[in-house]
Image (spheres, rainbow, N blue to C red):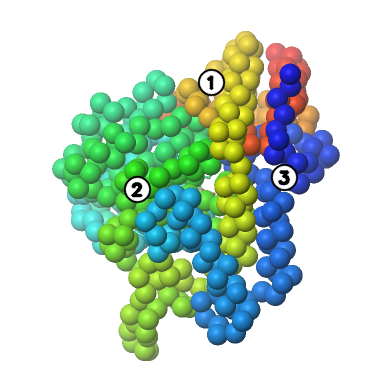
Amino acid sequence: MLLTSPWRADFPGILALEAQGQTYLDSAATAQKPQAMLNALLGYYAGGAANVHRAQHLPGERATRAFEATREKLAHWLNAPGPAQIIFTRSATEAFNLLAYGLESQFQAGDELVISALEHHANLLPWQQLALRRGLKLVVLPLNESGLIDLTQAAQLIGPRTRLLAVSQLSNVLGCWQPLDRLLALAKAQNALTVVDGAQGVVHGRHDMQTLGCDFYVCSSHKLYGPDGVGILYGREDALQRLQHWQFGGEMLVHTDYQSAQFRPAPLGFEAGTPPIASVIALGASLDYLAGLDNAAVAAHEAALHTQLLDGLAAREGIRLLGEPHVALASFVVEDVHNADLAHLLTEQGIAVRAGHHCAMPLLQSLGLAGALRVSLGLYNDAGDLQRFFAALDQALELLR
Ligand code: PMP
């Protein structure tokens, strides 16, 4: 029997794309949105927009309450001890930049920042640039052949000079869960700060911040079936206290005169200027929608799609998977076929997959590749999407070979 998604009809975007002849297989880049989220966006604007945290009037109070309700839902979603530990940024990328600037004063020349070879540019460039500004050393943990951060080498490279470890939970290219517990333990043994890039991980299953025990966890709304323009930074209470303020203006202060100012603590002290109000409120609706789903059914559906995707790729000659993906996300290259040519022919057939370096250029370079194709699936995808993809792939490969 053909695998269908009971949630597909909840996502008008996926239905619209289908009607346009497009098969959307790029949810790791950004996900389609549930109708409930669209209703919340429209509801906020159509019901009367107002700024948050600054107005006494009723619309302002209402907007502030809805905005803060999302912070509470996120704290619940991540099992953070409280909503004050959730900071809203404009993207996951901005959250990493906040950390790299906010923690800058914690480091001295010669200190080591440790990342891994598979990091997205968002979790590479802010640390790389911080290292250049401050004379720090950026240490890169290598991977093993399965696409996991090599723990033996990590145990050697994480040492007394390590002041920070920043690693991905789930690679956006290789699709594998990283051995976070072991890595975080190595960093904590050195009293180093720990940052986890949860941009991909947060979408698959639920993650408990108190069990994970990292100092900071970064993720982003638009991949979690929410609107774009919102990044999420969770911080442990003591870790947040180590952050210096980095963007200034608006309501992020307690008091200012012309010459000096005193700033608010987290979260509001790190949310300078008018935040993305509508998007934050609508993210709350996406979380409500997700919370209403049967988690086990979603996981089983994603696992079934994952198997079909991997089986289909394995059944075709000359396809090389990158890593050993654990979730419904697979990057691959095809022997003797340029990935840009293949991407072009898939695009022509209405298949929306990602091609290129996936914002992880050093990883692709280290694999000796200029680029790769990536198929990534959301809970709304079904076997029909995969059938269309494989039919298009076969046709493209026939032409190219
Ligand atoms: N980290 C990873 C692993 C990602 O996949 C992405 C998004 N491609 C980011 C960080 C950056 O997220 P954002 O687009 O919200 O800045």
Q: Secondary structure at mark 2?
A: helix
Within 10 Å of disc 3 (Cα), the crowding (few <14, some 14-19, many 20+) is many
Query: What is the three-letter code of the residue carrying label 1?
Result: Leu
Q: Nearer the viewer, residue 43 or 219?
A: 43
Q: Nearer the viewer, residue 374 or 232?
A: 232
Give me the disc on residue 210. Answer: 2
Give me the disc on residue 114. Answer: none
Q: Secondary structure at mark 3?
A: loop
Q: Are marks 2 and 3 in contact (CB under 8 Å)?
A: no
The residue sitting at 75% across, 26% down in the picture is 384
Q: Position of residue 37 (x, y in %)?
A: 67, 55
Instruction: Identify the image quadrant of the N terminus.
Output: top right
Q: Is residue 67 left or right of residue 86?
A: right
Is residue 255 depicted above or below 183 in this figure?
below
Which mark sits nearer the N-terminus, 1 or 2? 2
Residue receiving disc 3:
11
Residue positioned most to the left: 160
Residue receiving disc 1:
321
Q: Is residue 249 visible?
A: yes
> How many angstroms separate mark 3 from mark 1 (CA)?
30 Å
**Location of residue 395 (image quadrant):** top right
Q: Position of residue 57 (x, y in %)?
A: 60, 84
Q: Position of residue 25 (x, y in %)?
A: 67, 34
Looking at the rendered image, the disc whose residue lies closer to the viewer, 1 or 2, is 2
Residue positioned most to the bottom: 257
